[in-house]
Image (cartoon, grey):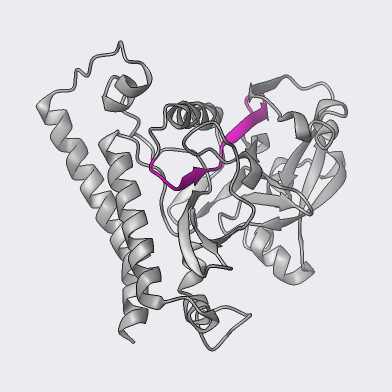
Amino acid sequence: AVQHHPISVAFQSGISQLQLVSHPNATMLEAGSIPERLLNIFKFYTDKHQIPMNKYAVDISGKQSAVQDSIDAFVLLSKRSFIPFDGDFQIKTSFPAQITSENRVIDWKTALDAIECARIVSKLATLEKLPDNVWVLPTLFASQVKDDDNTTFYIRGGLRDAYCNGNVLGVPEHLTPIIACALTTRNIITPDKTLFESLVEFGFNPLILFRDISNAIIGSQLHFIAIRWVPDAHTQNIAYLLDMNRKCFVGLLLKDSECEKNKIISGGKLASLIFPSVTPTESEHQSTQRIIISTLYFHHTIYTKHIEPLARLLNK
């Protein structure tokens, strides 16, 4: 798994590759739809019945002889998501190995949940119930060869597809997304300093940048918790949107529209926002449990991952 890990491959080869594996007579499961602007790109799937898979999944499945082509791509920190060269979209694949605490294969129920989450976020955006100045990348399409979780893949929208409050799609082009974890870590571009320090040298006010990021990440998470929707907000999944001309923080980008597992509250406040006829029926005990879960999640993810690293840099 380590040998075929997309990040290892990228370091060795300069790029990662998605392999296109032929499944000409397979029964396919599909959810969502391929965006019209990507139909021509995905003819390898619609016309040639080729499934994009990472090399490790191909090897585990014994499908090496069925590989017909490949796509050069950048790999994201999530380890399973790839951005094809010159493409404003992601292809997320199953990775049948344990990375950190969980197996990274994508089963079909998880794929259906991802599509449903995108539908809910789209509805929240239409109702203007998302936090202000927050954009969310949607999962638009999912597919797999029936009963073969190693073949599951998503098409996730790019910056032009991001949902925000109202009917306008896309992150404004003048904004630059910076992945949260990249802001406080050493990197190969400036090995002697963090990107946060480089931004300060570029002209950003460090105190204002810290204040605005903290207010945004805390405020958005409190908003989401209040409507019983807890997105995956760890620092690889959140990007800070910066205006490099004005040298200021503008908003947040969530890199997927998925909710934390077991935190979509059916019949709860979120449901009542989307379906006004639904009345909340949660018991006091269930409500208390959710408050505890949300509080622990908030402290673990928001304070320790986003705010403390910036505060430590400021202290230095």
Query: Residue 207 appears in which quarter of the rendering?
Result: bottom left
The C terminus appears in which quarter of the rendering?
A: bottom left
Q: Where residue 227 sits in the image (x, y, percent)?
A: 29, 33
Please check the rendered image and state whether residue 240 is part of the magenta-colored stretch, yes or no: no
Please check the rendered image and state whether residue 139 is part of the magenta-colored stretch, yes or no: yes
Q: Nearer the viewer, residue 212 or 47?
A: 212
Is 25 left or right of 285, judged from the image as shown?
right
**Which residue is at a point 34% across and 34% down the rendered structure image?**
262
In the rendered structure, which segment of residues is drawn in magenta? Answer: 131-148
The residue furthest left is 284
Q: Nearer the viewer, residue 9 or 237?
A: 237
Q: Where residue 4 sits in the image (x, y, percent)?
A: 69, 59
Whether residue 301 can be seen here: no
**Which residue is at a point 18% across and 44% down the rendered structure image?**
292
Q: Which of 223 and 157 is in front in this view?
A: 223
Above or below 272: residue 189: below
Q: Where residue 302 sits in the image (x, y, percent)?
A: 32, 57
Whether residue 112 can be seen here: yes
Tell me how many marks there are: 0
Above or below 294: residue 242: below
Q: Where residue 113 sits in the image (x, y, percent)?
A: 49, 29
